[in-house]
Image (spheres, rainbow, N blue to C red):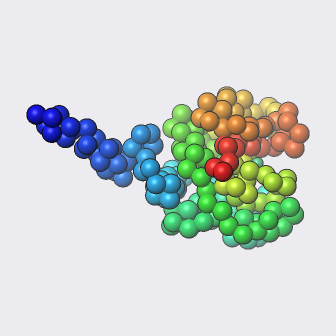
Amino acid sequence: MTKMKLLPLLLLPLLLISCATQSVPVGSGLPKNHDQARVVLAKRILQMPNQIQLMSRHVSGRRDNATAYKNMVSTAGGWSAARSSYAKAPGGYVKLQPAMLYGMIALANQGYSYQVSELAGGGHSRNSRHYDGVAVDICYINGVKVNYRNPYYRSLMRAARKLGATEVYGPGDRGHSGHVHIAWPRPY
Ligand SMILES: [Zn+2]
């Protein structure tokens, strides 16, 4: 009798995981293993090009393999994402963190379409969270360039905070007149 009652409970996590591989991989069905989770989430993001546009060049005009698009392709392939080596960027590689990838999908699922100018790449301030794989820069929202007249950036910033982002800047904040910066806590 006890065994019969326990069985469904034991099967539940397996069901959740198998569901996650078939449909939108967000929520409780996400694999517990972070390496698996980041691959599943990055693949999902690459399947949403109408909602999430990942730039394949840097705003700075510099050329390297650390663009937002290349960062995501690497992550979907199970690799780390490259950082840039110019300005104050430290070079090397970092893993994009699942909390950020999940947040990016959740924003799209809330109806925002947006363009990502940088993830781990690009030149940012020293010790920027970008270099730790937990920050995303957004330069267009719903087809409109981010600036103080953009009608969407404030609500997007609020939505990001609700999704666990703890460092959110935009027009009105120093250095962010043309993009929204959203960062989650560092994983360590
Ligand atoms: Zn930023």
Q: Considering depth in this image, is 130 or 143 the residue closer to the camera?
A: 130
* Count of residue discs: 0
Q: Considering depth in this image, is 128 or 110 the residue closer to the camera?
A: 128
**Residue displayed at 25% across by 38% down:** 9
Q: Quadrant of residue 126?
A: bottom right
Residue 171 location, x and y as percent?
Answer: 82, 36
In this image, 129 relative to 42: left or right?
right
Residue 34 location, x and y as percent?
Answer: 50, 54
Q: In this view, does 57 lie above or below 186?
A: below
**Residue displayed at 41% across by 40% down:** 28
Residue 165 location, x and y as percent?
Answer: 66, 38
Residue 68 location, x and y as percent?
Answer: 66, 59
Q: Is residue 76 above or below residue 154?
A: below
Quadrant in which the N terminus is drawn: top left
Q: Is residue 83 above or below residue 20?
A: below
The extreme left residue here reads 1
In this image, 157 relative to 10: left or right?
right
**Residue displayed at 61% across by 30% down:** 162
Would residue 48 be visible to someone looking at this image? yes
Q: Considering depth in this image, is 96 or 61 the residue closer to the camera?
A: 96
Would residue 47 be visible to someone looking at this image? no
